[in-house]
């Protein structure tokens, strides 16, 4: 069974590859800020982070499903959309984008624990049939070391890694040494919860091991 990742996130792509899945990756054409703003106007206020990540994950997956229907009508498999946000002390953080904002966040995060929210939208796509969707939000708490120095923060920000990831940190690369504890599925912090994806795939009638395109050799 084929898998299409509705994202060009290197972390999500690597995560799937590490568990034996080589997906087709398609960048969704979704204006995330516009989608979030429209939802806030409709609600009369900002959406809670769990609702927002699910809304954006669904929008991304739906966009790619629609494009596959016209561009690859013979596609038979799963389309996976995801979105992540980090909440700390009542504030929700997406990607910092600038070194100044990343530095400010890391100084705030020292010694603190926040929640990483990851939205998942999985569609079962079959030629000639209407796509079926299963969704879920996964959460993982992340605790940061309290003894991180300003020099370490400056060096980490200068690496460029935290600028384009939710919450301004990674757990599977340079940022991992500054994290002392993760409660929840660790892959949630990377970008998608693998255990959640397995469950959603099963809800849609797909066996996880049938998604493997490669298997480790002994």
Image: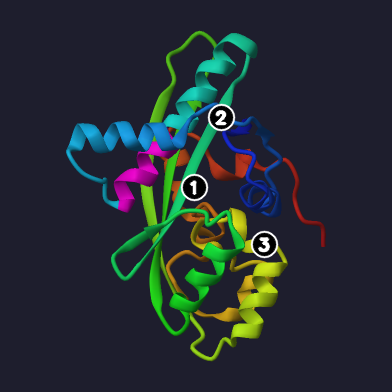
Distance between the alpha carbons at the discs numbered 2 and 3: 22 Å
Mark 2, other Cα within 10 Å: few <14 / some 14–19 / many ≥20? some
Residue drawn at 65 percent across, 84 percent down = 151
Residue drawn at 68 percent across, 48 percent down = 10
Q: Are marks 2 and 1 in contact (CB under 8 Å)?
A: no
Q: Which residue is mark 2?
A: 28
Q: From the viewer's side, name the closer residue of 146 and 206.
A: 146
Q: Is residue 23 above or below residue 177?
A: above
On the question of residue 73 being in view, the answer is no
Mark 3, other Cα within 10 Å: few <14 / some 14–19 / many ≥20? some
Q: Quadrant of the C terminus?
A: bottom right
| 209 to the left or right of 110 | right
Residue drawn at 49 percent across, 43 percent down = 82
Q: Which residue is mark 3?
A: 161
Tell which residue pokes out farthest to the left in this image.
Answer: 44
Q: Quadrant of the N terminus?
A: top right
Q: Is 50 included in the stretch rendered in magenta?
A: yes
Q: Position of residue 167 (x, y in %)?
A: 49, 61
Disc 3 secondary structure class: helix
Q: Position of residue 198 (x, y in %)?
A: 49, 47
Q: Is residue 49 above or below residue 5?
A: below
Disc 2 secondary structure class: loop
Distance between the alpha carbons at the discs numbered 2 and 1: 22 Å
Q: Main secondary structure of the magenta part?
A: helix
> Which labelled disc corresponds to residue 133?
none
Q: From the viewer's side, name the closer residue of 192 and 74.
A: 192
Q: Is 30 included in the stretch rendered in magenta?
A: no
Q: Position of residue 213 (x, y in %)?
A: 72, 40
Residues rendered magenta in the picture: 49-58
Q: Which residue is mark 1?
A: 198
| 195 to the left or right of 34 | right
């Amino acid at each position: 069974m084929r898998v299409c990742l509705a994202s060009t996130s290197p972390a999500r792509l690597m995560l799937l590859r590490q568990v034996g899945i080589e997906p087709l990756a398609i960048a969704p054409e979704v204006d995330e800020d516009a989608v979030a703003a429209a939802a806030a106007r409709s609600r009369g206020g900002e959406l809670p982070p769990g609702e927002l990540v699910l809304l954006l994950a669904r929008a991304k997956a739906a966009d790619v499903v629609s494009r596959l229907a016209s561009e690859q009508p013979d596609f038979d498999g799963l389309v996976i959309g995801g979105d992540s946000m980090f909440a700390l002390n009542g504030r929700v953080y997406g990607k910092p984008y600038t070194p100044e904002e990343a530095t400010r966040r890391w100084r705030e995060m020292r010694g603190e624990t926040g929640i990483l929210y990851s939205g998942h939208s999985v569609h079962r796509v079959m030629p000639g049939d209407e796509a079926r969707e299963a969704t879920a939000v996964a959460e993982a708490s992340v605790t940061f070391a309290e003894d991180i120095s300003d020099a370490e923060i400056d060096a980490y920000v200068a690496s460029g890694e935290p600028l384009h990831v939710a919450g301004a940190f990674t757990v599977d690369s340079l940022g991992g040494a500054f994290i002392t504890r993760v409660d929840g599925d660790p892959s949630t912090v990377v970008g998608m919860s693998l255990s959640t994806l397995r469950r959603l795939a099963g809800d849609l009638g797909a066996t996880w091991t049938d998604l493997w395109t490669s298997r480790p050799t002994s």
